Image (tube, grey):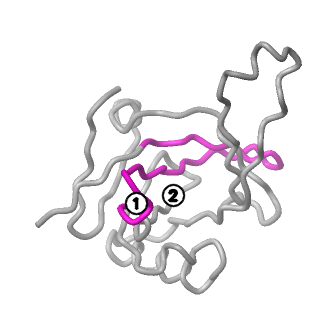
Amino acid sequence: MPRRIEGEVVRLQCRSCASIFHAFTFSGDTDMVTGDLAFATRVDSAELALAEAPSADRLDEDDGAREALEARIADALGRPGFRAPRLLRFEEPPPPPDPAQWQHYRAAKVVYQCIACPTGEAVEITRLSVRAFVRSSGRINLLGDLVLDQAGG
C-alpha cells in the first residue's frame, strides 16, 4: 500500500558561494510519521528526491548513512549528483525591538551545510508548496512506494 507523505519545499541559498538549492520539509502529526523519511537535492537543477531511509535520523551525524542514501538515489534514478545536505543548526530570530510585537511568532531559521562548497552554510530564502514548486519547473522524484500529497498552493 502506498505511503502518503506531505510537506513543502524550501529554497536555500549559501551565505558563502551564493549557490541555490532546495530542501524538503516533511510534515506529519508526529515525528514518528516522518522520522524515517529523507531527501536529497541537486545544485544544478530545481530537483529533489524523496525516500524512506531507516537511518534518516542519523543523516546529520553519519557521513556513511548520507553517502549510502545518495548512492541509492543515484542508482534508482540512473544518474549521480544528488546530495543530502547536513542540517547544521537552528538559529533563533532576535527578539523584535518593539515589545508589542513579541506576541507574533517567528520560526527559527534552519541552517544546512552547502552542497556546493565545503564550508558554506545555506539558509532559507523562500518556501513553496509542492504544487508551486512543480509549477515553477521543479521536479520531485519519489523512491519506493511513496505518494506525495500536492494539496494547497
Marks 1 and 2 in Cβ contact (< 8 Å): yes
Q: Which residues are magenta?
A: 8-34
In the rendering, at what x and y percent does residue 109 appear?
Answer: 70, 43
The residue under label 1 is 49
Secondary structure at numbered mark 2? strand
Residue 150 falls left or right of residue 129: left
In the rendering, at what x and y percent does residue 22 appear?
Answer: 54, 48
Q: Is residue 144 above or below residue 49?
A: below
Which residue sits at x=43%, y=54%? Answer: 48
The residue under label 2 is 41
Observer-nearest of 78 and 153: 153
Which kind of residue does numbered mark 2 sit on?
Thr
Residue 126 falls left or right of residue 38: right
Which residue sits at x=65%, y=37%? Answer: 107
Residue 153: quadrant of the picture: top left
Secondary structure at numbered mark 1? strand
Taking the view exactly as shown, the residue that stands out farthest to the left is: 1
Placement of the N terminus among the 4 image quadrants = bottom left
